[in-house]
Amino acid sequence: MDPVIALGIVLTAAAAGLLGSLLGLGGGIIIVPALTLLFGYSMQEAIGASLVAVIATSTGSASYYVEEGVSNVRLGLILGIATSLGGLIGAMVAVYTDQYILALLFGFMLIYTAYYMIRNSDSTGICPSGPCGAFDLSCSYKEENTKVEYGVRNLGKGMAGSAVGGVTSGMLGVGGGVVNVPVMRLWMGVPMRAACATSNYMIGITALAGAIVYFQFGMILAGLAAVVAIGVFCGSLLGSRLSKRLQGKALKTVFSIVLISVSILMFLKAAGVMP
């Protein structure tokens, strides 16, 4: 790989890792479009490298969020079962799917998620602390000088949504966070910052399930994956530490803007407008 190109990929991956760590996305929403639109890799090759990057993001930021008590570990373990199974299914579908169809699906998935996040207010729907159903998945964390306490509702619905997030991860290399974060925030009543942190905890397991399939089909380029992983890991370490300074409303706004911007680029890719 040319050193200049490698440096460009590392810097792009670092930005993706920072944003992915802040928003619980894994960085795939930037890695995949960047590798296909800027650096000329196929969708499958970009997705394979992105899944490796998602694992790096999770490794770099999840431990920090767990130590700070923001991640809901019990919730993440339960949802992780569904999302990992979905990741295997999504990866198997993606290896046989045309890259322009994948780009189109990528765009639709992002624009819908952005709309769903904008339409719902962040000030409503947080589940009160305490048991909800058969499981008590209540959790708390400190945000500035305030202790935030919440419960978790709609566990079955959340697991179904996480399975869809896993399929999305395997097919599009985005780690599943673009589905898991809205599912936890809007369906399960988890505050935005806790949803992002818990998603970071889950996405490494999800991405690993999909990456195994891509590796078996020879769609993970070792050199590309290594360069991307280095940049993403560094960015994710910084992003996890910046998260304390951003409120849930700010995170949601950034999340939505990024999704809409990237979806437009992927629609252009699917239409053949961008090479």
Image (cartoon, rainbow, N blue to C red):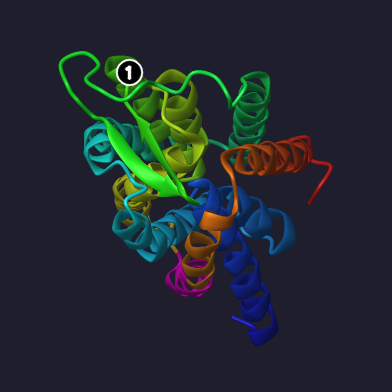
Q: Which residue is mark 1?
A: 153
Q: Is residue 27 visible?
A: no
Identify the element where label 1 is drawn: loop
Q: Main secondary structure of the magenta part?
A: helix
Quadrant of the rendered structure where residue 6 is?
A: bottom right
Q: Residue at x 21, y 38 (%)?
A: 74
Above or below, 130 against 239 in this view is: above
* Residue at the extreme left of the image, as rendered: 134
Total marks shown come to: 1
* Residue at the extreme front of the image, as rendered: 145
Residue 159 placement (x, y as % from top left) = 30, 24
Left or right: residue 57 versus residue 215 is right
Residue 172 placement (x, y as % from top left) = 51, 41
Residue toward you, 39 or 193: 193
Does the magenta segment cover residue 227?
yes
Residue 272 placement (x, y as % from top left) = 79, 40
* Residue at the extreme bottom of the image, as rendered: 3
Residue 195 placement (x, y as % from top left) = 43, 38
Left or right: residue 22 versus residue 187 is right
Quadrant of the rendered structure where residue 220 is?
A: bottom left
Above or below, 66 against 138 in this view is: below
Q: Residue at x 64, y 73 (%)?
A: 11
Does the magenta segment cover residue 47?
no
Q: Residue at x 69, y 38 (%)?
A: 253
Q: Is residue 107 visible?
A: yes
Quadrant placement of the N terminus: bottom right
Above or below, 33 against 112 in this view is: below
* Residue at the extreme right of the image, as rendered: 273
Magenta segment: 221-233
As shown in the figure, which amino acid type bears the numbered disc 1? Arg
Residue toward you, 175 or 198: 198
Above or below, 6 against 29 in this view is: below
